[in-house]
Image (cartoon, rainbow, N blue to C red):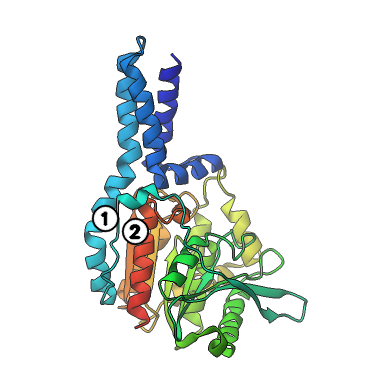
Amino acid sequence: MTRLIIIIILLLLSLLAVLRAQAYYLWLMAIAVSEFPLIFAAGTVIMLATGYWAAKYQLAGTVIGIIALILFLSPIFRSYLVSKHVKRDLISAFGAAKDDIEPFSFGKLFNLRFQDTVKSQTLTYVNYPDGAALTLDFFPSQIAGKRPCLIVVHGGSWSSGDSKQLSDLNHYLAKRGYNVAAINYRLAPKYQTPAPVEDIKNALAYLREYADELHIDTNNFVLLGRSAGSQIAMMAAYTLQDKDLKGVIDFYGPADMVWGYSIPSNPLIMNSRAVMDAYVGGPYSKIPQKYHDCSPLFFVEKNSVPTLIIHGTNDVLVSWIHSHKLDVKLTENGVKHYWLQLPWATHGFDYNLYGPGGQLSTYAVEQFLNAVTK
């Protein structure tokens, strides 16, 4: 009986690999299930193996276990299918690709965390008159000479999070020859839009000023944002009109704040309207123009920078419809772009660089950087 109960629990967990989570802690579990699939698959195999000597409930437990195992492994199979065309699609969208890496490797799934780190330094990039001092974590390129610089903008609903968030990608890209500056920015509700965009402008000015010391190629800056940070990065990319900004990378970001306010998230996961009220300065009914003015979608034009969109359709915090709308707008304006769609992935899936979604997104980011900073 105990075996059957455990296998039923595993089946319920495996559903998170294909269905959207319906509560906050289930969302966190969905990240684990979809990006560390071998751990859960191994547990299921162990429970299936016990069926060879368990007398009661053997058949039922075995059938349920096999279903759970298939579901746990499904992100691996689906990522393999996506990997078959992602290289071709990225080359078509942006140009040449590096040939020394592959989009997906089954062997990498056995790596749990990126360990090959570089030494970073924390630098203060701006001091505001009100006393706000903002810092960035700088990860120097491990290839000599002046190299492109990626500015990373963290997520956290505009009101939390910091530059330490999901830093594995920063270490990886520094090893691959890119300078990475992960910035802190002014947070809501004390600071509201467009303050964080001004912070990015100041970060760019600081990095230019110290470019020689930091070995930065000032002709090649790229912005990367996650979630709320992606809204900030896209706004900066599409409005600053900076000739040295060569592209923007959008990880599951809200592109249309007007539409996003009209379709709130599941309240068991996040009160999205309250989050937006704090950042924008009030509800849409009172300040509709301000919601329009912080929607990256409305600032896309034919001269907008190349854009890489990465979004999972199982995202329960920021709907994939944002990325669909952005994809359409970029297409209408003839802007170079690519949307990496991950059908099994949820918000924050890139926590594990070696997971099914993590491998594909890391590959896409590197190929994009290589293409736009040539």
Q: Find residue 268 and report its horizontal and vertical position in percent.
A: 56, 42
Q: Amino acid at mark 2?
A: Leu
Residue closest to the eye, 240 or 7: 7
In the image, taking residue 356 as reference, residue 117 lies left or right, namely right
- Secondary element at image label 1: helix
Q: Find residue 334 and report its horizontal and vertical position in percent.
A: 30, 78
Residue closest to the eye, 281 or 203: 203
Q: Find residue 21 and report its horizontal and vertical position in percent.
A: 46, 41
Q: Amino acid at mark 1?
A: Val
Q: Find residue 116 and report its horizontal and vertical position in percent.
A: 47, 62
Residue at the spot of label 2: 360
Q: Earlier in the sequence, mark 2 or mark 1?
A: 1
Crowding at dot 2, Cα within 10 Å, few <14 / some 14-19 / many 20+, comes out as: many
Task: Please report contact status of discs 2 and 1: CB closer than 8 Å, yes or no.
Answer: yes
Q: Looking at the image, is 3 positioned above or below residue 74?
A: above
The image quarter in which residue 59 lies: top left
